Amino acid sequence: MRLQLSEIIAYPSGMQIRLALTATEICAEIARHETRALTNCDDFSAQWSYLTVTIGVDDLSGEADPYYPLTTNTGVGKGMEYRTVPRYWINTLPTSGTITLIAGWPQIGLEPVTTTAEVGELAE
């Protein structure tokens, strides 16, 4: 399983953050099962899980909702791959020059991991 911070793009009104999660084999099969509600909008009873992301900017932090959770599944059985590339929007530019991301999906075997990204001074 691989989780990457793919891209941070700063705009005058905020930042877009893009992550990429790739799971293979059994983790991919579990991820595919866990995200059925994301791909089946007619399944209102589902309580499935997804990658959980908390973003911290300066003294503010909170759980982020992806606004574009593009997901792909390839293969069947052995050799299966699950890949999701969600984008997150932050309305605040950091005055400290850093953002903190905590991402995890324990249901498929990804315990929460924390990373701090240096983005430089973006706000005035």
Image: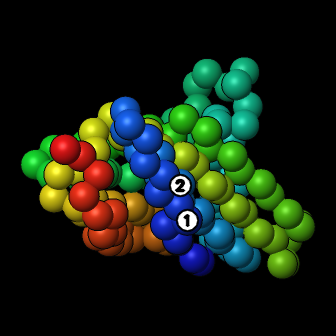
Compared with residue 27, is residue 51 higher up or lower down, i.e. above or below?
above
Which residue is at a point 58% across and 32% down the rendered structure image?
Answer: 46
Quarter holding the N terminus is bottom right
Image-based side of 10 in relation to 46, left or right: left
Rendering coords of residue 68 (x, y %): 61, 39
Q: Quadrant of the C terminus?
A: top left
For label 2, count other residues whose C-alpha is less than 10 Å away and answer few (under 14), some (14-19) or many (20+): some
Q: Which mark is residue 6?
A: 1
Q: Which residue is mark 2?
A: 18
The amino acid pointed to by label 1 is Ser
* Residue 66 appearing in the image: yes
* Residue 57 location (% of width, % of height): 22, 50
- Mark 2 and mark 1 residues within 8 Å of each other at the beta carbon: yes
* The label number, if any, that marks residue 23 in the structure image: none
Q: Amino acid at mark 2?
A: Arg
Kindly report the distance in space between the C-alpha atoms of the residues bearing marks 2 and 1.
Answer: 5 Å
